[in-house]
Image (cartoon, rainbow, N blue to C red):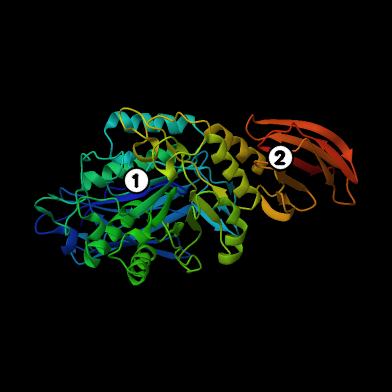
């Protein structure tokens, strides 16, 4: 009987891994089927296994309930079939709250802890040399971001014309790739970085496919695409911090139809027993975010000036959380999507927030090494990250831990919790005061928030009726009212 290498305990929402020895001859990636059924006495969960090279096969599972679990493997290879074992699922590790789930128009971890996305983009950071990857990890550990969009596959695009150290398949762009096999070392590096993010409390928004390619990975064909997605999900789904993004700018992958995306999404659903968040990102036209497999909208800008302004409309259209993963990046490159100021990015973040959504960060400041954060990671030099963290604190202070759109005047949007916690945001307007009618039946405290200088000034207590709120006559101001108990 094959004796599995597997631990006796695993923390709730941790990665439990079963390692088995099996055949290394032929093509184990396609010749061998392996799965395991995990059972806690109340339900069964089927998990697909994968070949990790050198005769090693693995099954990874994320237990979501404390207590005793058992497993039994099933395989078309006798030495891997019928292997049994068990473990004890213990209390979660400190700070672990489980996978993030969509909850109405917002997000929460599996244990109910509110999750407020403060996202950034570093598309190709996992494909860089160790010096840059280490610098990226240290930057993230010291920063405010709790989600990173990152490509599974290498990227070839402006300011990113470096060959990666590894590729997902054996072969080469010149001589062709053997898409029936994988390079396990490529995937090990990627999942090690996913694990490093999890240790920092950061979600890995894994972009499975993208069009920025010189190697042929954007047009592998249906069978190779299916194998790639299946293998990737089997390797990564046990990590609690994973989100799936079927593609970045899906509409730029011209060889794929909607039927292809629906088929690939079905592969993810089939192979992910833990039901991680899943979406797909547009360049121009939107995908139909009402599709049942899509958990939230992952949106790119729709206009050079306006995108966050549509957040409340999109919430109503799709009935799901709206994450504007790209509204343009803080930076100074020649491209219009990468040269807005930190002030403008923060304005867009606040505009989206009071409309009930989440606007993400990106940074594209030019440097001689062409190590731009948005693609290669490294260091951040912009002015927006700390101010995004300040916005998160304002949102988190709400009684519900989120902001939802409220009835507003034409010149200033209001978001929060009606009759309890209301934030009026003035954006680029510069009033010297505001006559603010307060909701009846309560007394209120009134704060003036400088969203750029990150200050909160209490200007009134026990206010009723209409209050005249003094303002400094500069941009990026907000007024918050809090009901007194």
Please rate how many residues cluster around mark 2, counting C-alpha atoms within 10 Å: few if below 14, some from 14 to 19, many from 20.
many
Find residue 313 and report its image quarter: bottom right
Could you tell me residue 49's position as x and y percent?
A: 28, 58
Could you tell me residue 110's position as x and y percent?
A: 54, 53
205 left or right, relative to 354: left
State whether residue 273 is above or below residue 203.
Answer: below
Q: Which residue is mark 2?
A: 478
Please rate how many residues cluster around mark 1, counting C-alpha atoms within 10 Å: few if below 14, some from 14 to 19, many from 20.
some
Q: If you read the primary sequence from the N terminus, does the residue marked by circle 1 or circle 2 appear first?
A: 1
Q: Are marks 1 and 2 in contact (CB under 8 Å)?
A: no
**Where's the N terminus, which quadrant?**
bottom left
**Where's the C terminus, which quadrant?**
top right
Find residue 376 and report its image quarter: top left
Could you tell me residue 88's position as x and y percent?
A: 43, 50
Please name whichever residue, 271 or 161, is drawn nearer the observer in this view of the structure: 161
419 left or right, relative to 429: right
Counting the numbered discs, the total is 2
Please name whichever residue, 69 or 55, is drawn nearer the observer in this view of the structure: 55
Which element carries disc 2, helix, strand or loop? strand
- Comparing labels 1 and 2, the label whose residue is closer to the camera: 2
Residue 111 visible in the picture: no
State whether residue 355 is above or below residue 201.
Answer: below
Q: Which residue is mark 1?
A: 7
Please name whichever residue, 418 or 213, is drawn nearer the observer in this view of the structure: 213
33 left or right, relative to 404: left
- Tag of residue 21: none
């Amino acid at each position: 009987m094959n004796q599995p290498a597997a631990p006796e305990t695993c923390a709730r929402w941790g990665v439990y891994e079963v390692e088995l020895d099996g055949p290394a001859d032929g093509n184990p990636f396609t010749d061998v089927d392996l799965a395991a059924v995990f059972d806690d006495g109340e339900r069964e969960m089927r998990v697909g296994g994968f070949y990790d090279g050198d005769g090693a096969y693995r099954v990874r599972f994320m237990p979501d309930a404390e207590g005793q679990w058992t497993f039994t493997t099933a395989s078309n290879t006798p030495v891997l079939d019928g292997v049994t074992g068990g473990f004890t699922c213990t209390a979660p590790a400190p700070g672990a709250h489980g996978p993030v789930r969509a909850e109405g128009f917002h997000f929460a971890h599996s244990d109910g802890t509110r999750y407020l996305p403060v996202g950034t983009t570093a598309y190709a950071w996992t494909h860089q040399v160790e010096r840059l990857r280490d610098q990226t990890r240290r930057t993230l550990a010291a920063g405010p971001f709790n989600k990173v969009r990152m490509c599974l596959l290498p990227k070839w695009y402006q300011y990113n014309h470096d060959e990666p150290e590894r590729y997902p398949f054996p072969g080469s762009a010149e001589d062709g790739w053997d898409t029936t096999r994988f390079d396990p070392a490529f995937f090990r590096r990627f999942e090690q970085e996913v694990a490093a993010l999890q240790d920092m409390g950061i979600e890995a928004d894994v972009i499975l496919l993208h069009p920025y390619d010189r190697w042929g990975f954007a047009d592998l064909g249906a069978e190779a695409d299916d194998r790639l997605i299946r293998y990737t999900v089997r390797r990564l789904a046990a990590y609690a911090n994973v989100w799936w993004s079927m593609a970045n700018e899906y509409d730029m992958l011209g060889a794929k139809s909607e039927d292809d995306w629906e088929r690939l999404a079905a592969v993810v659903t089939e192979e992910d027993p833990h039901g991680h968040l899943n979406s797909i990102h547009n360049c121009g036209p939107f995908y139909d975010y009402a599709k049942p497999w899509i958990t939230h909208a992952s949106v790119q800008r729709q206009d050079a000036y306006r995108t966050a302004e549509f957040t409340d409309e999109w919430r109503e259209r799709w009935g799901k959380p709206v994450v504007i993963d790209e509204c343009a990046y803080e930076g100074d490159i020649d491209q219009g999507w990468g040269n807005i100021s930190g002030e403008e990015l923060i304005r867009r973040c606040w505009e989206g927030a009071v409309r009930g959504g989440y606007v993400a960060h990106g940074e594209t400041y030019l440097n001689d090494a062409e190590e731009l954060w948005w693609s290669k990671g490294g260091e951040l030099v912009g002015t927006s990250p700390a101010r995004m963290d300040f916005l998160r604190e304002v949102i988190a202070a709400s009684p519900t831990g989120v902001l939802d759109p409220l009835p507003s005047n034409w010149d200033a949007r209001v978001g929060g919790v009606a009759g309890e916690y209301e934030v009026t945001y003035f954006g680029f307007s510069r009033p010297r005061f505001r006559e603010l009618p307060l909701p009846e039946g309560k007394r209120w405290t009134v704060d003036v928030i400088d969203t750029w200088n990150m200050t909160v000034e209490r200007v009134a207590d026990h206010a009723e009726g209409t209050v005249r709120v003094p303002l400094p006559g500069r941009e990026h101001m907000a007024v918050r009212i809090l009901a007194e108990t």
